[in-house]
Image (cartoon, rainbow, N blue to C red):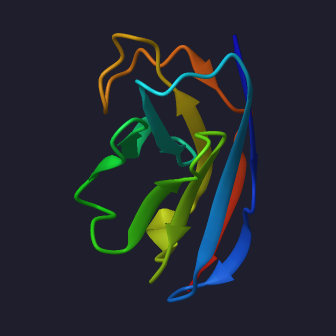
Amino acid sequence: MVQLVESGGGSVQAGGSLRLSCTASGTTYSNRFMGWFRQAPGKGREWVACIYTRYGSTSYADSVKGRFTISQDNAWNTLYLQMTSLKPEDTAMYYCAAGGPTTSCAGSDYPYWGQGIQVTVSS
C-alpha cells in the first residue's frame, strides 16, 4: 500500500513556473514507474510524464516536452514535476501516481493515486 500526497499547486500567469511535489509513504520499492497525470474540466485524464525509479529514466507527453521535468529524490520518496513556460491549456487538476510491478509508463493501470492538486494558468 502506498499513500501519495501532492503539494505545490496554485495559480500563475502564462509563462510562469510551478513545481509540484508528491510525497510517498507506506510500502515503497525502487523498480517501478511513477507518473504525473492531469485532468482539465470536461476532459479525460491525460498522462503527462513518468519516471522509472530505479534508473531515473523519463518520458513525456508531446504537449509538455521541453517545458516540464519529472524527477525524484534519491530515496524514491518524493516525486517532482517542474513546470515552466506554463500555458493556459496546462490548467488542470494534477495527480501523481505510483505504479505496480507491471504498470507501464503511460498506462492506465497505476494502482496508487494522490488526491490531486489544482494548477491554474491565466493568460
Quarter of the figure that contains the C terminus: bottom right
Near-viewer residue (2 or 10): 2
- On screen, residue 93 above or below 4: below
- On screen, residue 25 above or below 102: below
In the image, taking residue 47 as reference, residue 27 lies left or right, namely right
Residue 119: x %, y % from top left? 66, 62
- On screen, residue 64 above or below 34: below
Near-viewer residue (94 or 88): 94
Which residue, as the protein is rendered here, is positioned at the far front? 74
In the image, taking residue 56 as reference, residue 10 lies left or right, namely right
Number of on-image labels: 0
- On screen, residue 66 above or below 38: below
Q: Residue at x 29, y 61 (%)?
A: 63
In the image, taking residue 32 as reference, residue 112 lies left or right, namely right
Q: Residue at x 53, y 41 (%)?
A: 42
Which residue, as the protein is rendered here, is positioned at the far left? 62
Residue 2: x %, y % from top left? 69, 19
Quarter of the rendering containing residue 19: bottom right
Q: Residue at x 58, y 81 (%)?
A: 17
Near-viewer residue (80 or 64): 80
Quarter of the figure that contains the N terminus: top right
Q: Residue at x 53, y 68 (%)?
A: 82
Residue 61: x %, y % from top left? 28, 52
Residue 77: x %, y % from top left? 66, 40
